[in-house]
Amino acid sequence: MIRKSNDKDISKIMEIWEESTIKAHDFISKEYWKNNYNTVKSEYIPISDTFVYDDGEKIKGFISIIEKSFIGALFINSNYQSLGIGSKLLDYATKEYKNLNLAVYKDNKKAVVFYNKKGFNIIKEQINEDSGFKEYIMEYSK
């Protein structure tokens, strides 16, 4: 079931974020992500609409939408990837929000292919100011 997150979910959300982001972005140092942990937890998650995929026993993934238009995060616990949870969360978001965009690292090829299959198109390539790595800005609109 997909539901809006609550304060009790933050530790699980951050656990999924940390583990999944390090795994998905192995071309960026683990220290970079660990150094950004508190920023994500205390700045980005609080300003986002975050929805979790909760099967009744545990949270298996989440999506965070910033300012009702930017997907700031979509991460699935690595034990449950490739089971359609990411698709369900993204489908939920595209129904709730009219126009969405996101930034995805160019080297995260699996994610680029996933977003493309879900109807997102690359509209721009740029350098991420924080990490120095190339990223795509992708857009979805109904």
Image: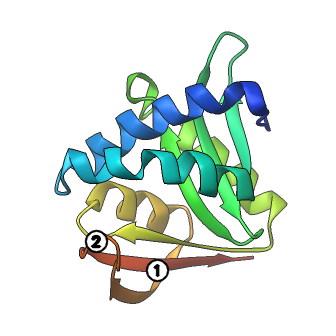
Q: Position of residue 93 (x, y in %)?
A: 73, 56
The dot on residue 137 is 1
Disc 2 packing (10 Å; few <14; some 14–19; many ≥20)? some
Residue 106: assigned label? 2
Q: Residue at x 45, y 25 (%)?
A: 80
Residue 33 appears in view: yes
Residue at 57 percent across and 61 percent down: it is 72
Q: Quadrant of residue 131?
A: bottom left
Q: Secondary structure at mark 2?
A: loop
Q: Nearer the viewer, residue 108 or 27?
A: 27
Front residue of 7 and 93: 7
Q: Earlier in the sequence, mark 2 or mark 1?
A: 2
Query: In the image, is residue 13 above or below residue 28?
Result: above
Left/right placement of residue 32 relative to residue 111 reads: left
**Is there any visible trace of residue 83 in the rendered image?**
no
Give me the residue at 80% from left, 73% from top. Answer: 98
Disc 1 element: strand
Residue 102: percent from the left, percent from the top? 54, 71
Instruction: Using the rendered view, name the quadrant where residue 55 is placed.
Output: top right
Question: In the drawing, does residue 95 fall left or right of residue 29?
Answer: right
Question: Which quadrant is the N terminus positioned in?
Answer: top right
Q: Name the image colouring.
A: rainbow
- Residue 96's mark? none
The amino acid beneath tag 2 is: Lys
Q: CA distance from mark 2 to mark 1?
A: 10 Å
Q: Which residue appears at 73% of the width and 58% of the height?
A: 47
